[in-house]
Amino acid sequence: MKISIIGIGRLGGALALALDGKGFEIETLVARDVEKANKIGESLKHQPEIWAANDFSEITSDIILIAAQDSEIELIAGELAEKITHQPTVFHTSGSLSSEILRRLKAVGCRTGSIHPLVSISDSRLGAEKFANAFFCVEGDAEAVAIAERMVGKLGGKSFSIAPEYKTLYHASAVTACGHLVALFDAAIEMLTECGLDKPDAQTILLPLVKTTIENLNEQTTAAALTGTFARADAGTLGRHLKILGEKVSPELLEIYLQLGLRSLHLAETQGANKANLDQMRGQITLAKTNLKC
C-alpha cells in the first residue's frame, strides 16, 4: 500500500522511516521544511515526491497520514476533502483529538481514523527504532481501525482502542506519564543542585534511580513499587524533608513534593502501612500546604 505523509516533523519523519519497506511504500512527503523532508526521503527505499506546498490534488496514495500540529489538522482535512479525487483512508496522529476532526473527509467517502504511538520521539531517526513493542492508540471507522492495526503490527507494536470522547483524557494520561515525568525529574535535579552539585552531575546521579523504579513498575503494581519515606510511613523523615525544602527550594518545588506526597500516602495505605503514621503525615502535609498559602 502506498502512503503519503503530511507533516514531516519528528513523528512524521519517524513513521516514514519505520513504515518504509514493511509492506508500505512512502509515495509523498509534504513538509514546510523541504530540506528535512529530502533527508528523510533519501533514506527510503523508493525516493518519494517531496512537496513544499499544500497542493493535495495530486495525492493518489491508498493511505494519508496527517502528522501536523493539532491546530492544523482540521484545516488540512478540509483542504484534502476539497482537492482529492479518490477516497483514501486518512489518519491523523494527534494524541488529544479523535477522528471526528476528519469529518469533512468522512463526508466525501474517505475512511477516517487516528493513530497515536505512546512513544517519546525527540528525533526522527532515533524514533523510528522505538515503535517495536510500543502501544498505539487507534480509533475511527471499523475499516480504518483494521488498517491501523495492520500498520501497527508491521511496526512491531501493539494496538488498543478507546471511545472517541475519551481521547483527550487518554492524552492527558500520556502527558502525565511522559512529559510530566521529565518535569518531575527536572525538579529532583534542581533539589540536588542545592546540595552543591551541578546539573549534569545531578542528572547522572539520579538517572539510575529512575531506571530501577521503571524496572520495578515493569514487574509490580504502582503501590507495590513504591519505596522510601512514604512507603515506610516515616513521619520523622517527612518532617525533616519539609523543614529543609522550606528553607532551600522554591515554593513551587515544595508544592510539587507535597502534592505527590499525598498520592504516595494513598499508595502506601493500600499496602497496609501504619495508619496512625499515615494520618500524622497527612497532617504534616496539610499544615505545610496551608503555610505555603500564607
Image (spheres, rainbow, N blue to C red):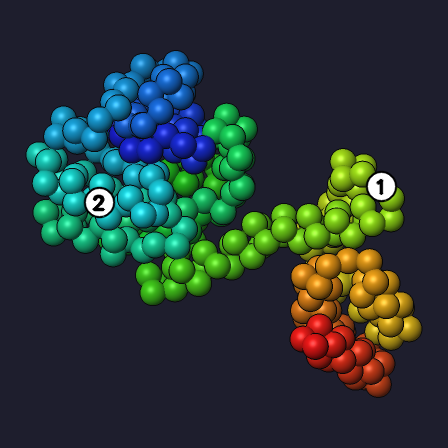
At 16% from the left and 45% from the top, the residue drawn is: 78
Quadrant of residue 60 in the image? top left
The residue at the far front in this view is: 294
Q: Alpha carbon of mark 1 to alpha carbon of mark 2: how far? A: 49 Å
Q: Residues within 10 Å of mark 1 (few under 14, many from 20)?
A: some
Q: Which part of the image, by quadrant, shows the C terminus?
A: bottom right
Q: Secondary structure at mark 1?
A: loop
Q: Which residue shows up at 77% across the image and 58% down it? A: 249
* Residue on which the image places disc 1: 197
- Between disc 1 and disc 2, the foreground one is 1
Q: Nearer the viewer, residue 44 or 149?
A: 44
Position of 148 with respect to 130 (left or right) is left
Residue 194 lies, in percent from the top left, at: 83, 49
Quarter of the image with the N terminus is: top left
In depth, the one of 46 and 190 nearer the eye is: 190
Q: Position of residue 89 (x, y in %)?
A: 22, 41
Q: Position of residue 266 (x, y in %)?
A: 70, 75
